[in-house]
């Protein structure tokens, strides 16, 4: 943990990221976190620790092909970043469409599939609050 903290502190300083964002990147990407942040350090969704560059990384470096894959396995927003769960769907799809050459129909289908998956997986939250 100490070396992760040091890496996160260095990343926060270099990339001008807040501590939570830098810490999340280091825990997900390790030593490659700097490269991820360099792709695009802007927030994917305002006021969340998820960066736009993470989508680029997921597609170009990790071979992600679906929005569901990016949300669940790459960004991990579906389970661990509640503020970005639904809000990240459209921005992820737009970035992936641009990178992968999707037409509007494919992008819309990806958005619908991701929203349906989130609704299905998180239905228990609605049940618990009722």
Image (tube, grey):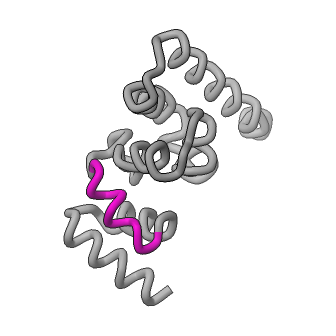
In this picture, residue 62 sits left or right of residue 121: left
Indicate the quadrant containing the C terminus: top left, top right, bottom left or bottom right: top right
In the rendered image, the residue lying farthest to the bottom is: 2
Confirm whether the magenta stretch covers residue 28.
Answer: no
Q: Where is residue 127 in the image (x, y as percent from the top left)?
A: 79, 34
Residue 81 location in percent, x, y? 53, 50
User: Is 33 in the magenta?
Assistant: yes
Q: Report the span colored magenta.
A: 30-40
The residue located at (62%, 50%) in the rendering is 73
Considering only vertical position in the picture, is 111 above or below 118?
above
Q: Can residue 64 be seen in this view?
A: yes
Report x, y in % for residue 17. Answer: 26, 62
Q: Position of residue 69 (x, y in %)?
A: 62, 41
Main SS, magenta region, reads helix
At x 40%, y 32%, the residue is 99
- How many numbered discs? 0
Q: Looking at the picture, does residue 56 appear above or below residue 93? A: below
User: Does residue 120 lie above or below 49 as drawn?
Assistant: above
Is residue 129 visible in this depiction of the protein?
no
């Amino acid at each position: 943990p100490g070396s992760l903290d040091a890496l996160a502190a260095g990343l926060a300083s270099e990339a001008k990221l807040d501590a939570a964002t830098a810490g999340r990147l280091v825990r997900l990407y390790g030593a490659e976190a700097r490269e991820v942040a360099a792709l695009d350090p802007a927030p994917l969704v305002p006021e969340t620790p998820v960066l736009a560059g993470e989508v680029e990384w997921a597609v170009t470096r990790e071979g992600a092909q679906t929005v569901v894959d990016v949300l669940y396995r790459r960004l991990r927003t579906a389970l661990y970043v509640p503020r970005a769960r639904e809000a990240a769907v459209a921005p992820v799809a737009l970035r992936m469409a641009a990178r992968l050459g999707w037409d509007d129909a494919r992008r819309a289908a990806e958005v619908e599939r991701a929203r349906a998956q989130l609704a299905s997986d998180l239905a228990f939250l609605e049940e618990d609050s009722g």
